[in-house]
Amino acid sequence: MDGTGPAVGLTPSSPKKLSFDDLLLEAGGFGRFQVLTLMILCIPRLILPQNFLLHIFISSVPSHHCAIFPNELMGNLTKEDLLLVYIPREVDGAYSSCKMYSQPQLHLLHNNSEVTANKSSVRSCDQGWEYDHSTFISTTATQWDLVCERKWLNSALATFFFIGVTMGAICIGYLSDRYGRRTMLLICYILSFVFGSLSAVSISYTMLAVCRTLCGISLAGLSITTVALSVEWVDTRHRTFAEIITGMFWSVGSVSLALMAYLLRDWHWLLGAATAPCLLGIISIWWLPESARWLLANGKVEKAEAELARCAVVNGQIYEKSSTNKRIQTLLEHRPPSVSPSYIDLFRTPALRKLSLCLALIWFAVASSYYGISLNITGFGLSIYLTHCLYGLIEFPAKLGIYVLMNWLGRRWTQVLVLMGTAVCIGANMIIPMAFGSLRSAVAIFGKGFSEASFTSIILYTAEIYPTIIRQNGIGYASFVGRLGVSVAPMIMLLEDVWLILPQTLFCCLAVTGGLVANLLPETQNVQLPETISDVESKRSHLHNEIQMTEH
């Protein structure tokens, strides 16, 4: 050891010992109790995309041009004539969004192909903008004129939100390992509802930015605690199935967001509608069990026994308290006294240090490329609502495909494959001409499917890699790095002003890098969840062999 203190959960591993999965099997394995728990955990998975992808709609920038205030002599001119004499055209023939003539160019009414006055006659908009309200009644861009020189403030709203998610991943990951999954999930539900409601009634840009940041912190808790609970109550053979089922509701939330945005075209109402389901989540906590794995890992034996007894009863099994208590005591003999986990434990030992660094690179690549595709929903010849709906629908076959691949190829090669598929689709759309709108749409939709598959895979992969004693810290750390990637994605999109395909080039390179690094991770298919750090540090092949023997 390096003298910095004992690593949490680091004990000599034995060739054969009782595991929590054995206790789960005695309580019915994967039964009605697990199904009901997963159904409850589908609620946060439904809420998350409605908030994480919300900025696509509430911060959308409609077509706009400088506000025109014609004098009395021009009262008979049509709208098109006013645009002609007041607004210069860009190279592509479209009216400028950010410039107007200092003086009306009346001569253009007689010959609109005539060369206009020199550039000194063109100035920036100083009296506001006029917006096209055919798609949106109101967005944050139209509310506070966050366009042209101020458009970075509009993109910054998404960045502020994901900075909050980033901070929440670290803070709530630690608190969840300290105080429990269920407790923190309830707190996060309440905070998400409060700050989401305040966001919906914001009266200033500053108020909205602050409330969305705080909302991001609380929503991060919904994300990481849900992942931990879903894998910790499921046995080894059903982990992939559990992640895919709960992950399906992310896709349901994504598709429903398109419908909500289509029906509610004012950003205040849309934000309120995305916040409302948190009330359902608060109510559902009454039926949600605490993680028995976490309870045992933290020495709360009586509460763990109560949860296991509840599991057995719901699953229709006969619960023998004395027998279960004896097996729990046997299980605890192989564990050290409860020590408060910390993020330092993710890097204290060699194997975990390597895993944590690799997962950081992969999460950054997965998250940034996923949101890079999700935020880029224009330029395909379809409405913003239809494009987002198709992006959501493609996730259903993607999740079914990832279920087959993860059971066939394993976790590692599946992660490599889907990240490379994401990179290929992003790269293809960089070279397909804009005129081929249908082809570009098809490639983008397939790219969204691959990126969603990579997200689904890495979430389960991360939960399987880290041991129970620091699992929530590990998921929180990985999510933290991933949200850094998400936070910079809106800013990367602004680089299209420098070079049109620069953002997509960066997202493509990140996906390729993530795929290469994923090849360095260990395979976790059909391997019991590690409970202590020693389970990660030692070779886990003997665990794999034990499970194969029990299956046969």
Image: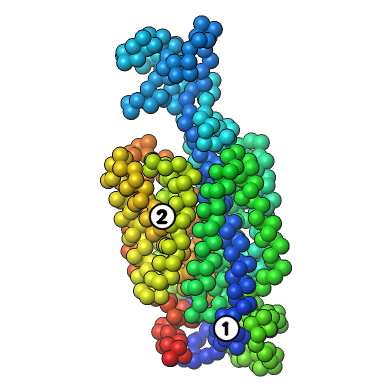
Which percent across, then down, holds residue 268?
Answer: 63, 41
**Residue at mark 2:** 448
Q: Residue at x 65, y 85 (%)?
A: 316
What amino acid does circle 2 point to?
A: Lys
Q: Quadrant of residue 376?
A: top left
Say which of 101 and 81 sits in front: 81
Q: Residue at x 67, y 80 (%)?
A: 314
Q: Quadrant of residue 512?
A: bottom left
Which percent across, then down, holds residue 87?
Answer: 43, 19
Q: Residue furthest top?
A: 73
- Is residue 393 positioned above or below 99 on the image? below
The C terminus is located in which quarter? bottom left
Which percent across, then down, holds residue 427?
Answer: 30, 51
- Is residue 233 positioned above or below 193 on the image? below
Say which of 239 and 259 sits in front: 259
**Residue at mark 1:** 29
Q: Secondary structure at mark 2?
A: helix
1 or 2: tag closer to the N-terminus: 1
- Is residue 342 positioned above or below 148 on the image? below
What amino acid does circle 1 point to?
A: Gly
Seen in the image, is 512 located left or right of residue 227? Answer: left
